[in-house]
Amino acid sequence: MAILVTGGAGYIGSHAALRLLRDGHRVVILDNLFRGHAEAVEAVRAAAAKEGRGLEQNLRFVRGSIDDEALVTATLRDNAVDTVMHFAALAYVGESVHQPLAYYGVNTAGGTALLRAIARAGEHGAGVQRFVFSSTCATYGEPGPGEVPIKETLKQNPINPYGASKLFFERVLADFSAAQNAAGKAFSVAMLRYFNVAGCDRSGLLGEQHDPETHLIPVILQALLGVRADGKNMLTVFGTDYPTLDGSCIRDYVHVDDLVDAHVRAIAALKPGEIRRYNVGIGRGHSVKEVIAAAEKVTGMKVPVTFGPRRAGDPATLFADSTAIRTELGWSPRYTNLEDTIATAWAWFKANPHGYAKR
Ligand code: UDP
């Protein structure tokens, strides 16, 4: 296949690009490098080259935004793209509360512009037939009693602009798919609702770098390495009064390679014109305190911790009911032990304490 990977210079997108190259596909990364890293694209190229099969020659990088319709249309046509994996997005819950327009602009309007380019590119010729969207468990909002583990059928009721911007695009995408299908252009869609993505590729070349870094596991590892941007090198546990066993929040940590595997299985399974929706998580939750304990075991170091108030917008407990993706796609996470997942992240952070930019 010829696959456009939007946001391919980011954490998950770069891991997806590498997997697709390893599987023998042609890959075009589209990224405006607002939050992505040119070095991540080069890392994908290097990791593909390491395979020794010339796979790196199947990689192209286009610097640009998803809402640049002329550029995206030309990119789709020039590369005869038949499949799109859409990772490009803004993805901080907290930031979305303060800058909602940026989130609706990129995640909802930007995605809509991407679909316009797909429609235009398909006016003459086959065009894009499959689309996988990075959606999120944040589209569900705060589940009620008895609603965890979360099933795909749970009513989506987001509690922050990030979740809402992703949910709105799910709807745009479903309507676009219906219209395309009605017009005789089969356009199938997988909406994958991610839980908490963690870990790094086995090559040791691909990593996770967000500026600012706010995600739990990277924050812990950066604090241990003494490289937190604020210089404090301390983890603050956000809230110890949640209605959970130890009072801290519970999340479902899925390894990035397993998440990417879900995408690969989705594109293989999609029949022309259909829409599928899957939760992607391992189906087990870990509290913040359990994550800290696991990180201490992996690193052999004591995590410097303070306990603070709750962070706005954080539900107490989120983990997936992953029955649908397991039974329908045969997906089964290889990483089911949190320590193994953290170990893959630790390997990259230790080798790249300052991220891609400054080795
Ligand atoms: N968390 C924390 N301290 C931090 C970062 C995160 O206690 O510095 C908690 C957060 O409240 C949540 C969990 O760790 O319960 C995972 O947060 P993260 O930001 O990694 O992902 P999210 O669940 O927001 O997508």
Image (tube, rainbow, N blue to C red):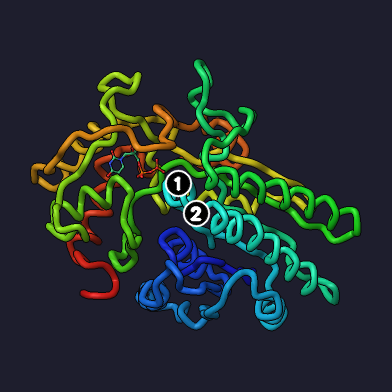
Q: Secondary structure at mark 1?
A: helix
Number of residues whose C-alpha sits closer than 10 Å to that of mark 2, classed few (under 14), some (14–19) or many (20 or more): few
Structural distance between the alpha carbons of marks 1 and 2: 10 Å
Judging depth in this view, the residue of 8 and 226 nearest the camera is 226
Residue topped by disc 1: 93
Amino acid under disc 2? Gln
Q: Split into 4 quadrants, where in the image is the C terminus?
A: bottom left
- Residue 258 lies left or right of residue 129; in this view the side is left
In what quadrant does ligand 1 lie? top left
Q: Position of residue 156 (x, y in %)?
A: 62, 33
Judging depth in this view, the residue of 308 and 336 nearest the camera is 308
- At 43% from the left and 67% from the top, the residue drawn is 35
Q: Quadrant of residue 87?
A: bottom right
- In the image, which disc is placed on residue 99? 2
Judging depth in this view, the residue of 258 and 190 nearest the camera is 190
Q: Position of residue 350 (x, y in %)?
A: 17, 61
- Residue 176 lies left or right of residue 41; in this view the side is right
- At 30% from the left and 38% from the top, the residue drawn is 337
Does residue 337 appear anywhere in the picture?
yes
- In the image, which disc is placed on residue 140? none
- The mark lying in front, picked from 1 and 2, is 2
Amino acid under disc 1? Val
Q: Pick out the residue farthest to the left.
A: 301
Q: Position of residue 43 (x, y in %)?
A: 36, 74
